[in-house]
Image (spheres, coloured by chain):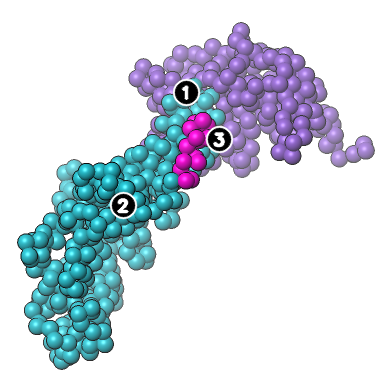
Chain colours: A purple, B cyan
Amino acid sequence: MTAKSKSAAAANAMHADVPASLRGVEVCKRFVAPDGREVQALEGVSLEIAAGEMVSLVGPSGCGKSTLLRLFTGLDAPTSGELWAGNDLISGPGAQRGLVFQDPNLFPWLTIRRNIEAGLVARGVLRQQRGEVDEFLKLVGLEAFASAFPHQLSGGMAQRVALARALVNHPKVLLLDEPLGALDAFTRMRMQDEVLRLWQARGTTMLLVTHDIDEAIYMSDRIVIMSPRPGRVDRIIDVGLPRPRGRNAPEFLAMRARILEMLHFTGAAEE
Amino acid sequence: MDADTMDMPAVKPPGRGARRFAESADAAGAEGSSSVATRPPARRGWGILATFSPVATAAIALASHRLVPNLQHATPTGVYARFLIGVMIVFAALGVTQRLWRRLMPSWRNWPVAGASNFLAWCVSSAPLWAAGMIVLCAWELVTLKWNWMPLPYFPGPDGVLRTLVDDWSSAGLGQPGLAQCMVQSLILLMGGFVTGSVIGIVCGVLIGWFAPVRYWGMPVMKLIGPIPATALIPMALMLFPNPTLSAVSLIAMAVWFPVTMLTLSGVSNTRASYLDVARTLGAGQGYLVLRVAIPAAMPSIFVGLFMGLGASFLTLIVAEAVGVQAGLGWYIDWARAYSDYTKVYAALVIMAVYFSTIMTVLFKVRDRILVWQKGTIKW
């Protein structure tokens, strides 16, 4: 109670983020594979995510969910179609859309504090916003490790730093590419709560790629199920369960069964 | 480690001090015998005697120096005997007081004490190496001066070489500069060439590694010119530069430039793509990506290049000095060889061994300082 309310207070002390909506319109993406063949990664994907919403992308591997996420960051450009963040057409990467990978990708040559500062340095606003670095360190509970180097942290701690590093820029959208995929089951559940807490504290729009259906149900407002080859949106599910969600509540388990059935993983194979 | 960590503040959370300390202990271990690093400085039982081992081996060397008859004709000078007695006294004193010397974290306030204590602790921990060194000296004297298995004038004994070191320190005779002046001269050439070559090499490496057009035009030039041994360019360098010092510096710079460029460009172009992606989503521009992501990520590779360059610079220095410049260690060896004074050659070799390995150690220290963040992953 105390630790949580304290860090929530710390989060509120910072000026609140203005979340943006995300919109993909008829997005197609083709790659040229190493053997020269063209691969259709995404075909006609249209998707709308409201400002401040938490949405999960799930689907079998190869369905293009990570590709879609990269297109939303602006690191890759779509072959055709348009991607919008709020009223801005996405044309390249920028600090308004933060990204967290499965691997925390902390800069190993920087201390934890300097890693969190990286975005401020990159944008040339470190002097004005230096004070916030401490608040974000506190927000993810790593004040004591400010001068440690990334190799000294555990996986969960490193991922918390990665979240803080993305959030210090006050992004309008946070894109999460299986951020908890490499963590053990216990750390993972704790980190899910941590991400939810950050989401509630900051109000940022979050788009989460995951292969864990429990995680998708536990975390998100809506779940986008994608199907592979070529990647497209299969259907969108409104979770609609009250928060905080019980992982063993009957409604939770019922929804889990429904989604598994949609993905043909019920055990009774149709083919 | 418990005795070590006692001087330090709390170990967790990992503060700066605790890490730096662990690092210096490890670095010392990497240079000396590897078992030393993990052993607490205060040894118990037979371990205490290890510090006295140089006393015993120096005594053996001294006995053989005094008692075994000479077969080579050389006038004994007493320098070698005095050196051995000095070693015995120093290590006897260190052995008695060894519990006092431990590694301390140098700070602004205590650095003279910490420096002295760390040096003495290093002497204590490397005592077995000193002992082995005395055995080597003894064997050297036996096969030359004592038994004459290796004949004069090509193979003088340790006594003659030590005497030359002392005699030639300030002047080599015949109005020529002494060893001290040669060391200064060599250091000037070496540092001038090494620093110039490294800076140009890092700049070239970053440009070629990062910018595709520079890579397209720069790579073939690199591949063509780089492999030419710098020493093969001596005639050209002597022609191009009016001043022999300048020509030697540029040759050394050339020798350093190639490996540094090669490894810098390899490090820069192999920067993990995900670091660059993350930096871009944090709002980084080209400047940040190059200076604050690609270059730090390439640092381990750059240091490999610097070490290779340093090795190449020693070689080039000695050759270049023998050709153009009329001073320095390379010149001294060449000059002594011309007079068939092999004692001087060996004296210069001894100086070179100590001198160059010290420079190497300094670069290792710099690397350890800059690559702290790699602690635990580097093994060289």
Q: Chain of mark 3?
A: B
Type of residue at label 1?
Gly
Q: Which mark is residue B273?
A: 3
Residue visible at 20% across and 45% down?
Answer: B243
In magenta stretch: residue B90: no
Q: In the figure, is residue B172 to the left or right of A201?
A: left
Question: Mark 2 — residue?
Answer: B234
Identify the element where label 2 is drawn.
helix
Helix, strand or loop for the magenta stretch, by majority? helix
Tell me, yes or no, whether the two marked residues, 2 and 3, touch with CB atoms within 8 Å.
Answer: no
In the rendering, at what x and y percent does residue B368 appear?
35, 49
Specify whether disc 2 shares its chain with disc 3. yes
Which is more toward the observer, B28 or A91? A91
Question: Mark 1 — residue?
Answer: B285
Q: CA distance from mark 2 to mark 3?
A: 42 Å
Type of residue at label 2?
Ile
Which is more toward the observer, A214 or B61? B61
Query: Magenta residues?
Result: B210-224
In magenta stretch: residue B213: yes
